[in-house]
Amino acid sequence: MPDAFHQKTRYDAILIGAGPTGIAAAYEFKNAGIKYLHLESGRLAQTIFNYPKNVHLFSHRCYLQIGNVHFPGKPHEAPAREEYLDYLGKVVSQQGLKVQLHSAVVELVPGNLNHCVRYRKKDGTITEVYSQNVIFAGGGYYKPRLLGIPGEDMPHVHHYFRTDLPVKNKKVLVVGGRNSAIEASTTLAGQKAEVLLSYRGSRLPRSKIKPWILTPFDEARKSGFIRIHYRTFLRSIKKKQVILRLDETEDIAIDTDVIFLLTGYGPDYSLLKTASVPFHKRTQRPLFNSKTLETKIPGIFLCGTLILTWKGKKASIENTLEHGKIILSNLR
Ligand SMILES: Cc1cc2nc3c(=O)[nH]c(=O)nc-3n(C[C@H](O)[C@H](O)[C@H](O)COP(=O)(O)OP(=O)(O)OC[C@H]3O[C@@H](n4cnc5c(N)ncnc54)[C@H](O)[C@@H]3O)c2cc1C
């Protein structure tokens, strides 16, 4: 390969993912004068963008602030999706952070000196770039957990809740039993949909649902706007009907117009797996050094909620915003 090619495409660091933690890492790199490339498969903060409109985060503003970029509003209140997206946009523009949007990293090939990153742009072209340091901030809640059932990919089946569908007087099935499913059911009931919630347990895990989400849900349920089918698993989906299996024995056919599968989200580790990053056998999570955030492959780092637990707690935005700083001091 000619030298000019390498000079043009080699960076001190390549950062994958522009969610809150990727943006916070970029903030550190920019301020340290690192020559880095920041790639994002979707739009800025795609995961936050996917939240339902006007929904509130649970983290308070004061814990979401990046560097010295002030987060306006009451510090001990959680921002709404729109306020948080505005704030993240402000961090990027005010600090002059360059993010290459709609550039999905499709392959990571580890090398002795430099790792190779291949990404696909919106027009389908593949570009190859190199760096000794690759930081993966792909998110812990980025990929919907699929049920692996027939019909899951049909157009009336949604894996992210949205409020812009014409659901009035329509039969809407919500699958799940945690915050997202409960909140979505309440919102749909408010939109005058006929809501049916399918949950696999014999009662809702109330202690795991935020109280401010439970209260309006209970009210909507008491008013008859939401019905719950406990101990059911969704088995298959057709255009106007689904099959729910009750108690692992009996199949029930239910008419439905719209379906929300809100069964949780998880990280997409496929990039790391094809790069042969070692994984823990039992937990099936990538192995990394908790002091440096480096994986077993030198120069490949994990950042943000992708690691799922951090310092004995569930990884969240507020406890992983410091990752950029840690990685910065361990770059090769
Ligand atoms: C309604 C709701 C409210 C929530 N409230 C909170 C809260 O208050 N506090 C909290 O901590 N968490 C909250 N969460 C979870 C929250 O979304 C995550 O904690 C947060 O997004 C994690 O930030 P992150 O930067 O680690 O990952 P993400 O925000 O998921 O960012 C990862 C980015 O990487 C990109 N990406 C992934 N793969 C590739 C690739 N191959 N190539 C290029 N780009 C890629 C994605 O497009 C994405 O933009 C909430 C979730 C929901 C649904």
Image (cartoon, rainbow, N blue to C red):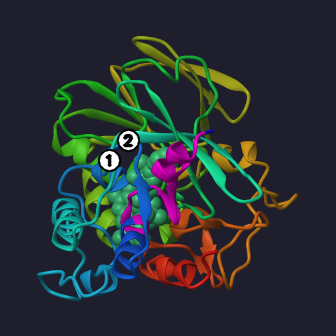
The answer to whether the residue bearing label 1 lies less than 8 angstroms from the nearest atom of ligand 1 is: yes
- Circle 1 is placed at which residue position? 50
Is 4 magenta? The answer is yes
Q: Position of residue 228 (x, y in %)?
A: 44, 42
**Displayed quadrant of residue 289:** bottom right
Q: Is residue 263 visible?
A: no
Seen at 45% across and 55% down, the residue is 17
How many numbered circles are shown? 2
Along the line of sight, the residue nearer the viewer: 195 or 99: 99
Amino acid identity at mark 1: Asn
**Displayed quadrant of residue 64:** bottom left
Q: Label 2 near label 1: C-beta < 8 Å?
A: yes
Q: Which residues are magenta?
A: 2-22
Along the line of sight, the residue nearer the viewer: 321 or 54: 321
- Circle 2 is placed at which residue position? 160
Point out the quarter of the image occupied by ligand 1: bottom left
Q: Position of residue 233 (x, y in %)?
A: 61, 34
